[in-house]
Structures are given as structure tokens and as C-alpha cells.
């Protein structure tokens, strides 16, 4: 059958992966300067589903022979899932990731050696053995600080001990999750900056579902940000209309669009690979697809296309959900939203902040609106079907 990946698959086979040749060679060229001691720090941005994770995993695979590449998804750390991401949670995630990566590369003895030789400087009383792996057990605040330094310096140490490596690369995906650190965010970013600048053979890639104008990006990457403009930014674009046309012709020839039908397909998916793949898999094959047919199928497919948003929606508070539904018909100022909810504007601040941090709302010149048209379309459809929005539970 036609070979296109599921919208949830992030480990694409070479046959499933499409396009992005220039992006890959651009990123690889910069990353490879790690081998002459000038590692880059790169920020990869782009809207949800555009293909950031797939692209980074592809790069990880391609550089795997010469580099030790560690990939971390901050949004799946247990702390973040429970709404309490902490520096310690991040540190644990990094520790685990290096440990597993060393094991995969067959250099786990090296990892253990580094830990053993650092035991004294770490001042840790205990390193326990869990299923053959050494796990430090910090007991005091001070222990944590030392361990944290140790973990963040690990990639440089591994490089120095393993002569066959050209460098190490740390990919931190969904980095916008670190907004959850709250007051600890700024100090953490500056701490990280200090570490990164002291390392000669470790490249860092931050990646997240944010646009280049997001607050977290400016906090890190702008001239005034922690990295003072010394970070390379790269925004992954959606596929162009021509790319989508060629992609579907090549990979799903059983989709028979007429010109208007294809135009509609592109309008619905906006060239975002997640939507392109999901919708292309759902559309009926072998029958003519005109404008009306594609429109109707799109409406029927909304629950599949909006699946990420449905997950996010189900985790919102009732007030957050109410705010969103007030914006389905168009953008509003905070004062107007508050009025329709019978609340003081100040009572909405925390919810509005969280909704923006989650990428569900945006604020342009004081006007709040729903960021993603597909999320909005799904809510409209639910309302149309049931006469009520799907509050709290789906
Ligand atoms: N280069 C590609 N070729 C073919 N399909 C792709 C490509 N890039 C992405 N896709 C499809 O889009 C889906 C979403 O990609 P991915 O998870 O990388 O997006 P993302 O930008 O990381 O999204 P999020 O912001 O939600 O993390 C993939 O599961 C795959 O089906
Ligand atoms: Mg991703």
C-alpha cells in the first residue's frame, strides 16, 4: 500500500521521509563544526506537526557514526506530565539519556568510569547500583547542585575520554516545556548558557513547537537574550504546494484529485506534514476527489486531525476551556472575555498565560485568538454536533 507515515510516527524509515534535503545539509554543516572545536548552538522552531522531531531524529541517525547524539523530549518527562517540571527532573532526564546512549554505543564502561572518578569531587555519599547501572543518590541541596554540574558536563567528559568521537550533540526537543520552571526559568537558562560556553566539543539543539517570535525564543536567542544573539535559529517551514503535489503523486498515487480538489486539500492541510499524512491516509482512494468531496471528508476527519489538541483540551481547567470557547467566533480583548465570563479581568491572567504557554492562544496587540485553525474547526464541529462544547471530558 501507499507508503506514508502515520501522523504520530516520529521514527520514519528512509522511504517514508520526504524532502528537507537542504535543511538537513544546512544543519549538518553547522553541527559538523563541532569536530574542529567550534560547536554551534541551534534553535529549531516551527508550528505543531511541521516535522521538527522527524527531522532531528533523521539528523541523529545520519551523524550517529561519528558523534554521540542524545535526544531528549522534555514534554514526556514525568515531572512535566504532572505539571511540575523541575531542574532536578531535567537533570535526571539528561543523566538517563547519556547513560542509555553510552550503552547503545557500547561505551557504558566509560560512563561508569567517569562517574566513579567523579565520586569524590561530587562528594556524594552514595551511588547505588540499579540493574547494573550506577545511580547517584543525592541527599542535600548541595549534593544536587554538584550532581547537576556533573550531569551537564558529562557530554564534554565523554568526548574527552573517547578518542573515536568527533563530538557530542544534545538535542532538547519540546524545550518550550521549560517555561513551566516559572521563577526558576531565568536562572536555569543562564546556568545552561554558562555550561554551553565552557564546552568545546558539545553542540546543542533546542527545538520546540513555537514560532520565532515566542517569548521563550527571545529570552534565549535574541540579542538581549541569554545567548546574546550567538545562537543560530532555524524555522522548519511547512511543505510548499508543489512539494505536497509531488509527494502525493509519488507516494499515494491512488488519490485522484481534480485541480480544485487538490487546492482544497492544500488549503485544509496548509502543507503541514502531520495534517498532510493524516488526511491523505483517511481520504478514499481510487475515486475522484473534487472540492466538495475534499471539504466534506475534511469535516469528517477533524477528530483525527485535531487529536493533539483534544489531548491538550482534556487537560485544561474548566475556566481555561471556557476562555477558549469564547474565542471560537473571533479574537477578543481580555476585558471582553472577562465580561462574558462574569469575571474580573485580573482573574483570567494565570489562565491566559498558561494557554499561551501551551501554544493554544496567541495575543496580538491585546487581542486574544485561537492559534490553530484546526483546533477551532474541531470545537465548532463538536458544538454543531452536540449543541454544547466538550467541556472537561471528551
Ligand atoms: N519529512 C517528512 N516526510 C514525511 N512525513 C513527515 C515528514 N516530516 C513530518 N512528517 C509527518 O508529520 C508527522 C509529524 O511530524 P513531527 O512529529 O516531526 O512534527 P513536530 O514538528 O515535531 O510536531 P510537534 O510540534 O507536535 O512536536 C510525522 O509523524 C510524519 O507523519
Ligand atoms: Mg515534535
Image: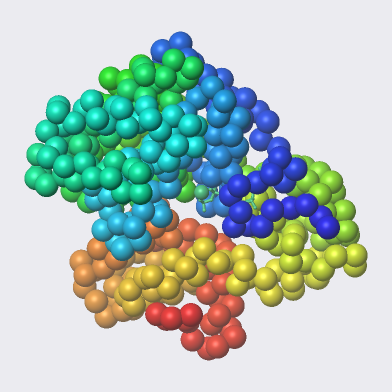
Do we see residue 228 in this rendering? no
Colour basis: rainbow
Q: Please state if 175 lies on the left or on the right of 104 as rendered.
A: left
Horizontal and vertical percent for residue 327? 44, 69
Residue 393 image offset from top left, x and y in percent: 43, 81
Q: Residue at x 85, y 65 (%)?
A: 285
Instruction: Answer with the quarter of the image where residue 307 lies.
Output: bottom right
Task: Residue 229 in the image: state x and y as whole percent.
Answer: 36, 25
Where is residue 247 drawn, in percent x and y? 78, 46
Residue for point 36% across, 53% down: 77
Quarter where residue 41 is shown: top left
Residue at 32%, 23% (x, y): give it: 157
Which picture quadrant has residue 340?
bottom left
Count the marks. Answer: 0
Q: Is residue 373 visible?
A: yes
Q: Is residue 344 left or right of residue 8?
A: left
| Position of residue 138 in the picture relative to residue 381 (left or right) | left
- The one of 70 and 302 positioned closer to us in this rendering: 70
In this rendering, the answer to whether 8 lies above or below 97 is below
Image point (74%, 53%), residue name: 4
Viewport quadrant of the N terminus: bottom right
Instruction: Give the farthest residue toward the top.
Output: 36
Amino acid at each position: 500500500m501507499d507508503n506514508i507515515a502515520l501522523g504520530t510516527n516520529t521514527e520514519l524509515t528512509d522511504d517514508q521521509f520526504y524532502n528537507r534535503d537542504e535543511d538537513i545539509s544546512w544543519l549538518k554543516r553547522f553541527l559538523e563544526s563541532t569536530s574542529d572545536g567550534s560547536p554551534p548552538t541551534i534553535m529549531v522552531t516551527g508550528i505543531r506537526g511541521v516535522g521538527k522531531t522527524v527531522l532531528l531524529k533523521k539528523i541523529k541517525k545520519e551523524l550517529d557514526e561519528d558523534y554521540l547524539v542524545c535526544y531528549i523530549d522534555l514534554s514526556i518527562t514525568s515531572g512535566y506530565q504532572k505539571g511540575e517540571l523541575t531542574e532536578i527532573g531535567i537533570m535526571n532526564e539528561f543523566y538517563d539519556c547519556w547513560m542509555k546512549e553510552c550503552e547503545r554505543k557500547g561505551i557504558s564502561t566509560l560512563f561508569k568510569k567517569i562517574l566513579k572518578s567523579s565520586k569524590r569531587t561530587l562528594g556524594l555519599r552514595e551511588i547505588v547500583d540499579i540493574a547494573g547501572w550506577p545511580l547517584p543518590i543525592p541527599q542535600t541541596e548541595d549534593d544536587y547542585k554538584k550532581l547537576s554540574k556533573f550531569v551537564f558536563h558529562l557530554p564534554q567528559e565523554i568526548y574527552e575520554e573517547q578518542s573515536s568521537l568527533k563530538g557530542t550533540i544534545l538535542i532538547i526537543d519540546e524545550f518550550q516545556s521549560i517555561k513551566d520552571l516559572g521563577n526558576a526559568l531565568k536562572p536555569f537558562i543562564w546556568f545552561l548558557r554558562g555550561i554551553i560556553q565552557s564546552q568545546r566539543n558539545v553542540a546543542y539543539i533546542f527545538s520546540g513547537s513555537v514560532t520565532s517570535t515566542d517569548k521563550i525564543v527571545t529570552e534565549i536567542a535574541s540579542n538581549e537574550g541569554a545567548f546574546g544573539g550567538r545562537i543560530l535559529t532555524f524555522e522548519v517551514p511547512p511543505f510548499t504546494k508543489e512539494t505536497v503535489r509531488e509527494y502525493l503523486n509519488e507516494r499515494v498515487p491512488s488519490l485522484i484529485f481534480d485541480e480544485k480538489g487538490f487546492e482544497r486539500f492544500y488549503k485544509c492541510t496548509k502543507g503541514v506534514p502531520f495534517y498532510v499524512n493524516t488526511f491523505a491516509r483517511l481520504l478514499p482512494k481510487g475515486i475522484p476527489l473534487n472540492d466538495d468531496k475534499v471539504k466534506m471528508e475534511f469535516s469528517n476527519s477533524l477528530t483525527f486531525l485535531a487529536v493533539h489538541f483534544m489531548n491538550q483540551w482534556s487537560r485544561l481547567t474548566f475556566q481555561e476551556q471556557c476562555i477558549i470557547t469564547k474565542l471560537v467566533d473571533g479574537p477578543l480583548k481580555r476585558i471582553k472575555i472577562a465580561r462574558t465570563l462574569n469575571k474580573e479581568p485580573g482573574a483570567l491572567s494565570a489562565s491566559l498565560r498558561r494557554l499561551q504557554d501551551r501554544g493554544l492562544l496567541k495575543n496580538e496587540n491585546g487581542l486574544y485568538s485561537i492559534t490553530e485553525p484546526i483546533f477551532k474547526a474541531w470545537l465548532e464541529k463538536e458544538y454543531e454536533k452536540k449543541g454544547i462544547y466538550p467541556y472537561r471530558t471528551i
